[in-house]
Amino acid sequence: MRRHERLIVAAVVLGLLALWETLVRLGRIDPGLAPAPTTVADALVRLAGRPEVRASLGVTAWEVLAAFLIALPTGLLLGFLLAEMPLLGALFRPLVNFLFGVPKSIFLPVFILVFGVSIAQKVAFGVFTTVFVLIVGGIAAVQSVPRDLITVSRAYGATRAQIIREIYLPAMAPILLESARLAMVFNITAVLLCEIYGARDGIGYRIAAWGENLQMPQLYAALVLVAVAAVAVNEVLRAVESRLGAWRQTQ
Amino acid sequence: MTRALVAIRGVTQRFGPDGAAVTALESIDLEIPDGQFVAVVGPSGCGKSTLLSLVAGLRMPSSGAVLCDGEPMTAPMPRKVGMIFQEANLLPWLSAVDNVAFPLKLRRVAKAERLAAAARMLQLTGLAGFEDRLPHQLSGGMKQRVAIARGLVQNPAVLLMDEPFASLDEQTRMVLGDELLRIWSETRKTVLFVTHSLNEAVYLADRVVVLSARPGRVVDDVAVDLPRPRSFAMTGSERFGLLKDRIWQHIKSAERR
């Protein structure tokens, strides 16, 4: 975004917040449903200072990270295998495409039955939800490698290892990062869903509890917290992606 | 006569299961002396490109052999043979100079050395000043110049060109043809140039080899006795027309079949 576009976006956001604040103070919006931004900000500062809330955030972050670190190599490796081995691909790609389209949330009760209400359950469900995005991404990445460039490299005497390093990796990098970013979005959603559905700790668990107790300022503050964290992760991955994929821009 | 730098001896190429299905090339015998510019023409699907990939060592013939400088080609020999394709096929994430240096990188030549060599080649192909451009920032003709520079960077004795100007517009094509002749007269490579264009073949080459429709056989081997340096005016001369017509008769009868 250019500078003046950013200024416009900031002005619109501030304007909406000011409108919201005014409407609550004038009594036009029920603060029990939507507390004023200043009230939410106040709750946010207090929450951030509470050790048990920080611990919950830590638990969630740990579950998200563990699931991601397991799913990333597993999913991409499976994707590469399915793309490069015709027989394996013919057997399993229809299955992967089928499961990719099924909403993973319907399997959540099964995960509770198998793993109990535990951190392992959250991680397993996160992996399960994420891995299909990565398999499909891995296949797409391999297929995006231009065959002609491989022929050129061979004509210039490239070894198999050189073809992987000099052609496959740079050609696949943008799609791999894009898949990782998408997978992270799915992953965070899956772990939070698990926590809201049934957990003993984690920020999702607290959001569910505050919601049930109608503690709206805390609930909204937690939403802001989670949103900021998720957007930050997304933006970091996107920055890396656009840097490594600059050559893909036409013009 | 100078000894043959590239020798194609009794080469037959079949495709399909057990090599039985389709015969692409049959009993090709060609001796190409050092420094000669040879154009290969023929009806579509006659195996012209297959012939080049055999000389490049990208595939092995079903029978017969290809010798380069007396050595049988069993694998690509990038230091002896440079290859240029119909599409420039540049690595889109590398700058022009890095693309030209790529064959040297594969051979683990030191960075400073390979970049210097690549910059010299870009100079030779008229792209000085465009070293740091990415492929998507270059025009089609410029990309093909980069590809030619990449083909020349290892100073190979043989340059294989597979319809290198086919995807360019007519004017760029003519300019690049003249550029190629200038580069050729400066470097004296042996060139094997596959093309669909009879004009291009007669204008550029010392000799035009005409292949028949599949299975590709050599049906004529035409010495182009036009003086060098070639000029655009020659394309209107009687001799030029006669040579083109002789080649056209073969192609026409093949395409009609």
Image: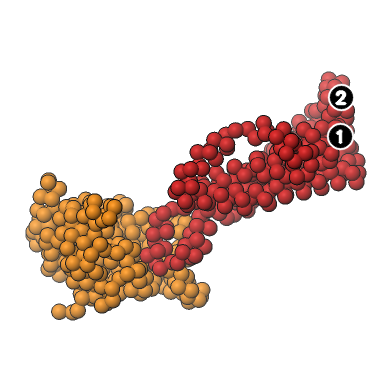
Which residue extends farthest bottom?
B2
Q: Residue at x 15, y 70 (%)?
A: B227
Q: Colour of chain B?
A: orange
Question: Does A41 appear above or below A88?
Answer: above
Chain for mark 2? A
Chain for mark 1? A
SS for tag 1?
A: helix
Q: Which residue is mark 1?
A: A218
Quarter of the image that includes the N terminus of chain B: bottom left
In the foreground, B144 or B16 = B16
Q: Which residue is mark 2?
A: A32
Where is residue A48? Give x, y as percent. Answer: 87, 44
Which quarter of the picture shows residue B246?
Answer: bottom left
Q: Colour of chain A?
A: red
Question: Does A14 appear above or below A124?
Answer: above
Where is residue B120? Give x, y as percent. Answer: 41, 73
Which quarter of the picture shows residue B70?
Answer: bottom left
In the drawing, does residue A76 fall left or right of residue A197? Answer: left
Which quarter of the picture shows residue B77?
Answer: bottom left
Q: Residue at x 62, y 44 (%)?
A: A131
Which residue extends farthest top?
A28
